Image (tube, grey):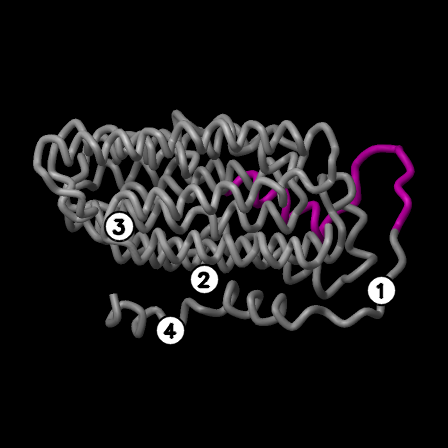
Amino acid sequence: MNPQATLIFITSLMLGTTITISSNHWIMAWTGLEINTLAILPLISKSHHPRAIEAATKYFLTQAAASALVLFSSMTNAWHTGQWDITQLTHPTSCLILTSAIAMKLGLVPFHFWFPEVLQGSPLTTGLILSTIMKLPPIALLYMTSPSLNPALLTTLAILSTALGGWMGLNQTQIRKILAFSSISHLGWMAIIIVYNPKLTLLNFYLYAVMTATIFLTLNTTKVLKLSTLMTAWTKAPSLNTMLLLALLSLAGLPPLTGFLPKWLIIQELTKQDMALAATLISLLSLLSLFFYLRLAYCTAITLPPHTTNHMKQWRTNKPTNVSIAILTTITIMLLPIAPMILTIV
């Protein structure tokens, strides 16, 4: 793609995100969401492959429906209360419609069907944008309206998302689809705590974005898209693959690594809110996603493919690793020791 065009689209993405996050009025928030949707479409379909065009079409239709629901929800609220302010969303029907719209924007169950397909049809860099930056405006809207939302509905959506995200990722061989189901599972953790402690949702999102960025950029460097190529990629950049293994375990939420921090804090907060059952359930369901992270980690460094098909091993590259990957990997692996400082901020 033309560098000038890419620059325009990336700038538009930043603009749309900033408008939505900083707006007080529903129409401005909706405008930001629309700018975002229109800016990402060329980035999804830039390869002109039928799969990419299909992904862009699915993304456009889903996001257009979700944006219409956001408008409908805000208009219903304005009709009943006379308020267009985002934080003044008080009408119960409007809250219900908005929750559905944001769930559709984010890819929460039961509106998750579009997300794995869109991620599978996109290049890895666009997949990274879809999994991180594009989730920020809807989460910001949830954050601003969190006092008015229905806790029972969000808890149900969250537990279903964690269950399906883990369950449906088990039999996947395409890494982008596995990361899509991983994203759905993580969104479940964010949704369950948004009503009780919205700051924890933001902390979880930031750490998830850092860990996912590490994995996407590493995969983009080694040019890996499916499990069979991941198994032979260790010859290309052994040290980078070792870091990928640790990043995957961090995304799974294993204790010595950064990914354990948000899960630990969320379980702690849920037990404080007398929701020990929900905390137990969501913790057990995250074991499902732990399985496919472990499988990815196993394929990354420990084993060669257990079949007779000859794979061509890749030459080791002397190209230095990108500085951004080095910084992100360090954060992904080593952030847990500063947890007490983060707790004082939260």
Q: Dot 1 corresponds to which residue?
A: 317
Q: Give the distance between the C-alpha atoms of the residues marked 3 and 4, in whole angstroms.
A: 25 Å
Foreground mark, 1 or 2, reads 1
Residue lying at the far left of the rendered structure = 81
Q: Is residue 256 above or below residue 102?
A: below
Foreground mark, 3 or 1, reads 3
Foreground mark, 3 or 4, reads 3
**Amino acid under disc 4:** Ile
**Amino acid under disc 2:** Thr
Image-based side of 77 in relation to 36, left or right: left
Q: Is mark 2 on a helix, strand or loop?
A: loop
Image-based side of 299 in relation to 84, left or right: right
First in residue order: circle 4 vs circle 2: 2
The answer to whether residue 271 of the structure is visible from this angle is no
Q: Dot 3 corresponds to which residue?
A: 143
Task: Name the disc covering residue 258, or none.
Answer: 2
**Amino acid under disc 3:** Tyr
Q: Give the distance between the C-alpha atoms of the residues marked 3 and 1, in whole angstroms.
A: 44 Å
- From the top left corner, tell me how far across and down residue 262 is, in percent: 36, 56
First in residue order: circle 3 vs circle 1: 3
Q: Dot 4 corresponds to which residue?
A: 338
**Range drawn in magenta:** 290-313
First in residue order: circle 1 vs circle 2: 2
